[in-house]
């Protein structure tokens, strides 16, 4: 049986295959005024995408929701993509929710609730604000503070069988069951007062949670009138060494947030590129861009302007630009980004008391 593991052991090999195997929709550029990730196909799939595209078009109410697991002291470029998507849907009129998955972290990673809270207040939440959320228009909560979410989770527990859980996740450890059902409650919680469309932008690894949540939503429809929640998935940022995903366990493959600009540049310097063996060859044949991790970094994260990216693409592909030069560009942009991020992080930390935290009891 094919499964995706949201807790991270296995990786998908082929995005098109995932779309087929798991019955996803391909993302067909339905959203208006697309952001960088949508324009460039980094957002590649989802579920019930048209429902949200329509809500935007008709200016109907919808929500956008995602969660942070406060497991480490740092975040990664994948989190940055989630924030960029939330910021996009926020701009398109969505009501935004960010939750701290402290109960999930306790149940699946053995992280103490107090410790999780400290980390989230000190770092994760300010980091999300620094990455571009509109803090005034976002509702934040901790799972453990949200009585409504906890009640929903207990109620949903009667709607799922162990066999079904196994079929979706390939595994049914108690902590994971708790984590998954709590996540279903998170995703449906904004529909408590009034059923409405909602979208969850996440990495593809979270799709099993969407399937579970949508199954629950169907079964609770008569009682609560839930609208099936939609989702959009983005591709991973590839490892600088050429693998599918940046991974902490692969030395030099991974840029974290925050990271000292010098250290990030050193990793870029040693990254796998599609440049040729010699300058002569490169001038003659041009780079193999499909294999170039530095170009991928520019495309996914560092170059906003499409024309600028196109210029780099053409120069590099034609051999006018060498891999040393593209690395130089990436290093400069990364340095600027990291410095900006640190500054904004400090500011967001100082202003954390102004955020809209909700306790639902
Ligand atoms: N499981 C998510 C993670 O591993 C965190 C999470 C909890 C979440 N509840 C959510 C994500 C609801 C999206 C929507 O990071």
Image: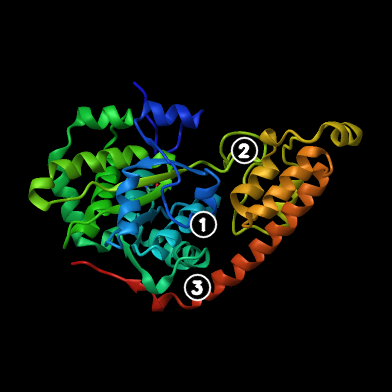
| Mark 2: few/some/many CA within 10 Å (<14, 14-19, 20+) | few
Tell which tag, 3 or 1, sits nearer the viewer.
3
Mark 1 lies on residue: 73
In the rendered image, is residue 11 in sight? Answer: no
Picture residue at 56% right of the left edge, 73% below the top? 346
Outermost residue toward the left?
Answer: 223
Q: Quadrant of residue 214?
A: top left
SS at circle 3: helix
Q: Earlier in the sequence, mark 3 or mark 1?
A: 1
Q: Where in the figure is residue 359, as x and y percent of width and height?
A: 25, 69
In-front residue for pair 294/230: 230
The disc label shown at residue 348, or none: 3
In the rendered image, is residue 310 in sight? Answer: yes
Mark 2 lies on residue: 250
Picture residue at 75% right of the left edge, 42% below the top? 270
Label 1 near label 3: C-beta < 8 Å? no
Q: Is mark 1 within 8 Å of ligand 1?
A: no
Q: Quadrant of residue 136?
A: bottom left
Tell which tag, 2 or 3, sits nearer the viewer.
3
Q: Earlier in the sequence, mark 2 or mark 1?
A: 1
In-front residue for pair 355/162: 355
Q: Earlier in the sequence, mark 2 or mark 3?
A: 2
How far apart in space, not on screen, are marks 2 and 3 (Cα)?
Answer: 31 Å
Picture residue at 31% right of the left edge, 42% below the top? 210
Q: Quadrant of the N terminus?
A: top left
Q: Where in the figure is residue 99, as x and y percent of width and height?
A: 34, 59
SS at circle 2: loop
Q: Is mark 3 within 8 Å of ligand 1?
A: no
Q: Where in the figure is residue 36, as x and y percent of width and height?
A: 55, 53
């Amino acid at each position: 049986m094919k499964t995706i593991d949201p807790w991270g052991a296995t990786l998908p090999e082929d995005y098109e295959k995932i779309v087929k195997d798991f019955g996803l929709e391909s993302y067909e550029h339905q959203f208006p005024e697309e952001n960088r990730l949508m324009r460039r196909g980094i957002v590649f799939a989802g579920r019930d995408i048209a429902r949200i595209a329509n809500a935007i078009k008709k200016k109907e109410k919808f929500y956008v929701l995602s969660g942070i697991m406060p497991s480490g002291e740092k975040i990664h470029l994948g989190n940055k993509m989630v924030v960029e998507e939330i910021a996009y849907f926020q701009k398109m009129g969505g009501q935004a929710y960010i939750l701290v998955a402290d109960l999930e972290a306790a149940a699946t990673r053995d992280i103490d609730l107090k410790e999780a809270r400290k980390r989230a207040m000190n770092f994760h939440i300010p980091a999300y604000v620094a990455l571009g959320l509109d803090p005034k228009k976002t509702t934040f909560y901790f799972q453990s503070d949200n009585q409504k979410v906890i009640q929903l989770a207990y109620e949903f527990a009667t709607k799922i069988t162990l066999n079904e859980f196994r079929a979706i996740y390939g595994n049914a450890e108690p902590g994971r069951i708790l984590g998954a059902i709590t996540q279903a409650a998170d995703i449906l919680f904004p529909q408590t007062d009034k059923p409405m469309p909602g979208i969850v932008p996440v990495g593809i690894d979270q799709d099993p949670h969407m399937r579970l949540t949508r199954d629950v939503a169907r079964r609770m429809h008569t009682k609560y009138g839930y609208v099936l929640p939609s989702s959009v998935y983005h591709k991973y940022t590839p490892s600088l060494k050429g693998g599918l995903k940046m991974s902490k366990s692969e030395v030099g493959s991974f840029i974290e947030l925050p990271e000292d600009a010098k250290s990030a540049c050193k990793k870029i310097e040693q990254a796998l590129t599609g440049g040729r063996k010699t300058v002569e060859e490169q001038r003659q044949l041009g780079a193999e861009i499909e294999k170039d991790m530095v170009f991928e970094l520019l495309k996914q994260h560092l170059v906003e302007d499409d024309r600028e990216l196109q210029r780099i693409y053409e120069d590099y592909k034609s051999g006018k630009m060498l891999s040393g030069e593209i690395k130089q560009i990436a290093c400069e942009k990364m340095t600027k980004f990291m410095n900006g991020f640190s500054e904004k992080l400090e500011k967001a930390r100082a202003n954390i008391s102004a955020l809209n935290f909700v306790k639902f009891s």
